[in-house]
Image (tube, grey):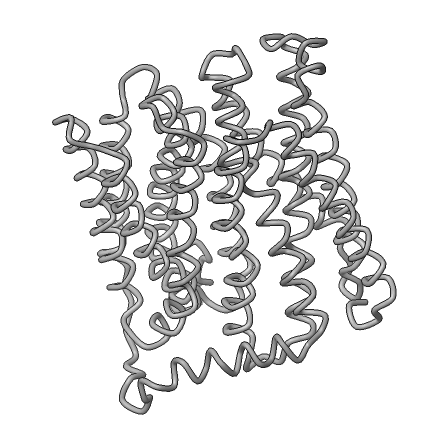
Amino acid sequence: MKKEKWLNKNLLLLLAGRTVSDIGSSIQMVVMPLYILDIGGSAKIVGLFSFFYLLPILLIYPFGGVFGDRFNRKKIMLYADLFSGIAILILAYLSKTNQLNIFLLLIIQIIVSTLFGFFDPASKGILPQIVKNDYLKKANASIASLRLIAAILAPIIGVWIYIKFNITILFIFNGISFLLSALSETFINYKHINRTKNIKNSSIIKDLIIGFKFIKNHKTILNLCLYFMMIFTLVNPVFTVVLPFFFRKSLNYPDTYYGFMQASLFVGALVGSITVGFLIKEKNSKIPLIYGISLLTFALIGFSTLLFPSVINIFGNDSLLYIFLLILTMFLMYGSLMSINIPLQTIIQQTTPEEYLSRVFSLVSMIAKGGGPLGALIYGLVIEKASIHISVMIATIIIVIISSQFIKSLLKNKETS
């Protein structure tokens, strides 16, 4: 009997669809801060855009997970991509006819982010039904690798399209990518199992409450959630709000350099994910977690130092050495974040009973990443009133203090060994 290949037709269709839409959406998200600033927007508006990009995903994600367990996952994915593509093409039309404004941009972004909150859990849930259990690790690794490759390519492609053409072409590119993804998903062979007959609607809330109680009663998981929420509040907005504002207002490089800077983040994530695979041990997830936190604080100190005007004057705001140092610190920051995230997932898997895993993961994601929208708003407001370098240095000092205390608690706690 011929052995079935792990890379079957259904998985190829899923990978193709996700890769195309990932490139399209990543391209748009990289360029949006520059576009907002170019049309007269402020750091506050960039922060607001990041807030409305992240918040709907976080609010919908837990419900999207329950929704994906009950209804046809293929249809959820297909309709989410289809309506996202239509929404983005509406942006292209509004841009072409000079009717696009910040308000409409925010509204459509909320719609697209909400749809992604349903799409992502469904796409993760459909995987075990189109790939044999023995091949799930390979399939998950392929999806993660392609997402990182898409994220690396997107800034370079996106900034080039924006400079060479205009924002309308970029919207068209992104809209078509979603439609192509939907087209790819229509050919996936998938048999839906109806689970709604014996499930009451009220059990959705009940399941989530049980998940919250579990996290609350397990100190290790709760502390990890709170620490990661702090990271997302103080660090993630540096890439989405601080960096584009700083690049536009304080530096004197062509926009292509901004694309390379953004690409360096995901190269760092790729290197970080590979490195942590060598560091992590089956019975001890603390070591790479501590390494990752230490590297993050070191990189943040370097990054915040480079933002000071006196340092910029020493190197020059258009020199190759300065941009190299800036890219290096961002590379290290994103690599360290990946070195923290992977052990975090491993610790949760090691300490959570199987019957709670899906709920706990979705709720941990919501709690931890919940700091992202809040941080984007705070940074957007603060850097308009205070100096960027002072704001980021204060945030760095806070992270160093909290991280040192968190590492001490990890070393004392035997539960995470």
Q: Could you say which is closer to the camera, residue 193 or residue 68?
A: 68
Dividing the image into 4 quarters, which one contains the N terminus? bottom left
Dividing the image into 4 quarters, which one contains the C terminus? bottom right
Give the quadrant of residue 239: top right
Q: Could you say which is closer to the camera, residue 30 or residue 347?
A: 30
Give the quadrant of residue 312: top right
Residue 355 spot, x, y in % from top left: 55, 82
Q: Residue at horizontal 75%, vertical 54%?
A: 289
Give the quadrant of residue 88: top left
Residue 100 spot, x, y in % from top left: 20, 32
Residue reaching furthest to the right: 412
Vertical arrangement, residue 335 with respect to residue 328, above or below: below
Vertical arrangement, residue 28 with respect to residue 84, above or below: above
Q: Residue at horizontal 28%, vertical 81%?
A: 194
Residue 172 spot, x, y in % from top left: 22, 32
Residue reaching furthest to the bottom: 198
Residue reaching furthest to the front: 385
Residue 87 spot, x, y in % from top left: 21, 45
Q: Residue at horizontal 22%, vertical 56%?
A: 186
Q: How many marks?
A: 0
